[in-house]
Image: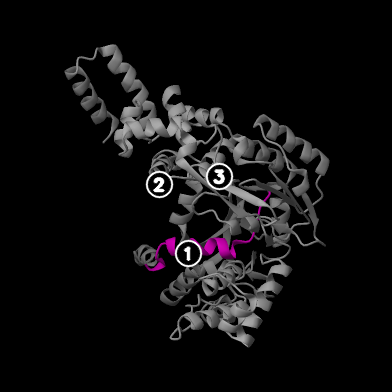
């Protein structure tokens, strides 16, 4: 229902209940703000109880005697000690999930916040900091408990809710006037609370040529050049004080290229992988499982875990998540799967088109040097015409290359050129995007096989810059992009969009009609 229909129905029912025009206009003015935010309209606690399907008395008791609606337990920390988890009772948890899905997830989080957001994973947080000269990590002290009820109320007020209803929603999300670790609303609320902090830090880092990400209470900085650590630290402390937060000095780390640069438990020096100690532990554990046998090993280590095998397979899967091509861990995973399922057979992945085949065989056979002036491959950089690209980028643009081949086969007299393009800068990534130029009878046509994908991405980007690429080498490109804090590694990232590319056959048909005319 659009707001016009809502306004009509509300006015009709309010008038039938004897409400005057001032009351109606006041309510509609309040409701319109929430409609614009695409969140549910909540007038009072009774209205909320109807929306969530929970009795009003239960909600009142939950916000008055909050401690009775949680149960507490402890889990071990990675660095020792215990972490207290406050788990809400089922019905309160259902209310919190409703608030999360219907209100909080409709709000935008900062792109530098990598935790607790769909489509943003631990791996994405780490990959921004690979192959850097210097990596610095900080930890925010007592993160969730430092975010209080007043701060949470302001979040709901900023969304558009009244002070009274904002306080009500905040009380349902807080325990002892602070964010509880265990409530489903706490992670997303923490990201919304830190939005201004993330934005200020990002702006500061952009000016200094520093990469910044935050994963919950872990904040990470990296750069290919030196960083004034003292100045950066003081700025962070100042911004944290504005949010009533502070650093944990015991967990601050400065990691140079010669060190093991670890970001949220992931090695990022040259590529993402498990730390050496973790890899060795996994190898040792698998060695004993293989040599001793599963049952003997479990008895030997006196393991009480009911799902030990699944737990071990999960650790192997995480290692493969970081290093998908690691054959050692692939074999470990296959071995464990066969223990769990004797009929298990490793699935053979469908391989994408090999760029070497496309460039070195197909293109050479189908297109002469007049159209592809130079083809080189040193396993790190590929060069197509006068445009040099990072290895793997051409793989994601196989459609463009095959499309050029189809054109050349169909129209031998047509000149096909794929050596011109553009670099689109958005959200800290550089997207290489090139066109196929077709020249016939001195009339030039061009076809962008990936236009829809890139136009959509560009429209979503808040800040974007463009660079035309013509006869530009990779060194020149790096110099041009150096000041813009770009992470130029599109093999993995662009592959995510491969499925979204338009079918080049459809584009081919359209251009075919033009050329035929």
Give the quarter of the image for residue 150: top right
Q: Residues within 10 Å of mark 1 (few under 14, many from 20)?
A: some
**Residue drawn at (54%, 80%) of the image:** 336
Which of marks 1 and 2 precedes in the sequence? 2
- Residue range of the region highlighted in magenta in the rendering: 485-505
Q: Which residue is mark 1?
A: 498
Nearer mark to the viewer, of 3 and 2 = 2
How far apart are labels 2 and 1 at the CA level? 41 Å
Viewer-proximal residue among 235 and 362: 235
Q: Which residue is mark 3?
A: 181
Q: Residues within 10 Å of mark 3 (few under 14, many from 20)?
A: many
How far apart are labels 3 and 1 at the CA level? 38 Å
Q: Secondary structure at mark 3?
A: loop
In the picture provided, is 496 more to the left or to the right than 21?
Answer: right
Q: Secondary structure at mark 2?
A: helix
Which of marks 1 and 3 precedes in the sequence? 3
Residue 479 appearing in the image: yes
**Residue drawn at (48%, 78%) of the image:** 349
Residue 485 screen position, x and y as percent: 68, 49
Residue 500 screen position, x and y as percent: 43, 61
In the picture provided, is 161 more to the left or to the right than 279?
Answer: left
Residue 180 screen position, x and y as percent: 54, 41
**Residue drawn at (79%, 55%) of the image:** 255
The correct choice, above or below, for 139 with respect to 407 in the image is above
The correct choice, above or below, for 436 with respect to 165 in the image is below
**Magenta residue check for 211:** no
**Which quadrant is home to the N terminus?**
top left
Viewer-proximal residue among 136 and 164: 164
Q: Which residue is mark 2?
A: 90
Give the quarter of the image for residue 305: bottom right
């Amino acid at each position: 229902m659009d707001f016009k229909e809502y306004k009509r129905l509300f006015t009709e029912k309010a008038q039938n209940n004897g409400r005057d025009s001032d009351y109606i206009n006041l309510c509609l003015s309040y409701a319109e703000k929430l409609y614009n935010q695409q969140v549910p309209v909540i007038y009072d606690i009774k209205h909320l109880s109807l929306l969530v399907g929970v009795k009003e008395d239960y909600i009142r008791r939950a916000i008055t005697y909050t401690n009775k609606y949680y149960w507490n337990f402890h889990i071990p920390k990675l660095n020792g000690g215990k972490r207290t988890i406050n788990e809400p009772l089922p019905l309160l948890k259902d209310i919190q999930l409703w608030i999360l899905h219907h209100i909080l997830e409709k709000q935008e989080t900062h792109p530098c916040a990598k935790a607790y957001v769909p489509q943003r994973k631990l791996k994405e947080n780490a990959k921004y900091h690979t192959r850097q000269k210097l990596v610095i990590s900080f930890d925010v002290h007592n993160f969730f408990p430092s975010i209080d009820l007043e701060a949470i109320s302001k979040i709901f007020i900023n969304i558009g809710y009244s002070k009274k209803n904002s306080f009500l929603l905040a009380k349902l999300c807080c325990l002892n006037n602070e964010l509880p670790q265990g409530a489903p609303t706490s992670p997303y609320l923490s990201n919304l609370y830190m939005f201004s902090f993330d934005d200020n830090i990002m702006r500061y880092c952009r000016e200094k040529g520093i990469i910044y990400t935050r994963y919950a209470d872990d904040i990470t900085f990296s750069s290919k050049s030196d960083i004034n650590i003292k100045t950066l630290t003081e700025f962070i402390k100042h911004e944290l004080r504005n949010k009533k937060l502070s650093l944990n000095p015991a967990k601050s780390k400065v990691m140079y290229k010669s060190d093991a640069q670890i970001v949220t438990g992931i090695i990022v020096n040259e590529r993402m992988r498990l730390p050496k100690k973790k890899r060795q532990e996994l190898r040792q554990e698998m060695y004993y499982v293989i040599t001793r046998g599963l049952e003997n090993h479990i008895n030997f280590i006196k393991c009480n875990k009911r799902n030990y095998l699944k737990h071990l397979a999960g650790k192997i899967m995480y290692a493969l998540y970081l290093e998908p091509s690691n054959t050692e861990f692939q074999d470990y995973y296959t071995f464990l799967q066969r223990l769990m399922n004797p009929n298990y057979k490793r699935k053979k992945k469908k391989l994408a088109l090999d760029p070497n085949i496309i460039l070195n065989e197909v293109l050479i056979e189908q297109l002469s040097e007049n159209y592809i002036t130079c083809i080189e491959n040193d396993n790190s950089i590929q060069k197509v015409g006068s445009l040099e690209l990072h290895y793997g980028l051409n793989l994601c643009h196989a459609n463009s290359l095959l499309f050029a081949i189809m054109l050349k086969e169909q129209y031998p007299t047509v000149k096909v050129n794929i050596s011109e393009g553009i670099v689109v800068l958005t959200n800290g990534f550089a997207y290489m995007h090139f066109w196929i130029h077709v020249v016939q009878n001195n009339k030039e046509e061009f076809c962008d096989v990936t236009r829809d994908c890139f136009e959509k991405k560009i429209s979503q980007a808040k800040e974007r810059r463009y660079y035309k690429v013509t006869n530009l080498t990779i060194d020149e490109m790096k110099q041009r992009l150096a000041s813009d804090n770009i992470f130029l590694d599109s093999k993995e990232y662009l592959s995510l969009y491969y499925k979204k590319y338009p079918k080049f056959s459809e584009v081919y048909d359209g251009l075919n009609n033009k050329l035929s005319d």
